[in-house]
């Protein structure tokens, strides 16, 4: 098997950056919820049970700043705002599935 060169510092920085976004409570659930297609704020609040409006708003802004979620305003009337995954956000869906499968098989809750 050919040995793959591994840049430990670059990998660590990338993983640290990824978990700084995805490691925040609710962000994985928001991304997963948007995996079904664009959604309004109210629909997301219903899909992510237990999240407050303020936290949902903050998390959506963070995910948008990270380039994972796009916010679209329809002038209406009435004015509506929808959220959808960007291509980068869509690319996360299989990774989140794999991570969930791995966690279920390998991490022990105490």
Image: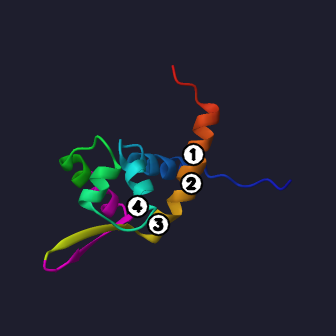
Specify few, some or many for label 2: CA neighbours under 10 Å numbering under 14, 14-19, or 20 or more: few
In the rendered image, residue 104, in percent from the top left (x then y), is placed at 59, 36
Q: Neighbour class for label 3 at 10 Å: few (<14), some, many (≥20)?
A: few
Q: Are marks 2 and 4 in contact (CB under 8 Å)?
A: no
Residue 87: horizontal and vertical position, in percent? 47, 70
- In this orientation, does residue 65 appear? yes
Q: Which residue is mark 1?
A: 99
Q: Tell me which label, 4 or 1, sits earlier in the chain.
A: 4
Say which of marks 2 and 4 sits in front: 4
Taking depth in this image into account, of 14 and 71 the one nearest to the observer is 71
Residue hosting label 4: 34
Instruction: Determine the secondary structure under disc 2.
Output: helix
Q: Where residue 16 sits in the image (x, y, percent)?
A: 46, 46
Magenta residues (range): 59-77
In magenta stretch: residue 101: no
**Quadrant of the rendered structure where residue 77 is?**
bottom left
| Residues at marks 1 and 2, CA–CA distance in whole angstroms | 6 Å
The reply to whether dot 1 and dot 2 touch (C-beta < 8 Å) is yes
Which numbered marker is on residue 95?
Answer: 2
Residue 10 appears in the picture as rendered: no
> Alpha-carbon neighbours of circle 4 within 10 Å: few (<14), some, or many (≥20)?
many
Local crowd size for mark 1, using a 10 Å CA cut-off: few (<14), some (14–19), many (≥20): few
Q: Quadrant of residue 42?
A: bottom left
Q: Nearer the viewer, mark 3 or mark 4?
A: 4
Residue at the limit of the structure toward the right, as seen here: 1
Q: Earlier in the sequence, mark 3 or mark 2?
A: 3
Please tell me which residue is depicted at 27% across the width and 43% down the height of the picture.
51
- Residue ID for mark 3: 88
């Amino acid at each position: 098997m050919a040995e793959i060169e591994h840049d430990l510092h670059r990998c660590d920085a990338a993983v640290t950056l990824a978990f700084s976004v995805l490691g925040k409570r609710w962000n994985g659930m928001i991304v997963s919820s948007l995996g079904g297609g664009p959604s309004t704020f109210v629909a997301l609040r219903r899909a992510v049970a237990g999240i407050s409006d303020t936290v949902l708003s903050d998390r959506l802004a963070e995910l948008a700043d990270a380039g994972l979620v796009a916010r679209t305003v329809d002038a209406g009337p009435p004015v509506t705002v929808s959220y959808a995954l960007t291509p980068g956000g869509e690319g996360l869906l299989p990774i989140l599935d794999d991570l969930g499968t791995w966690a279920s098989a390998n991490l022990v809750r105490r």
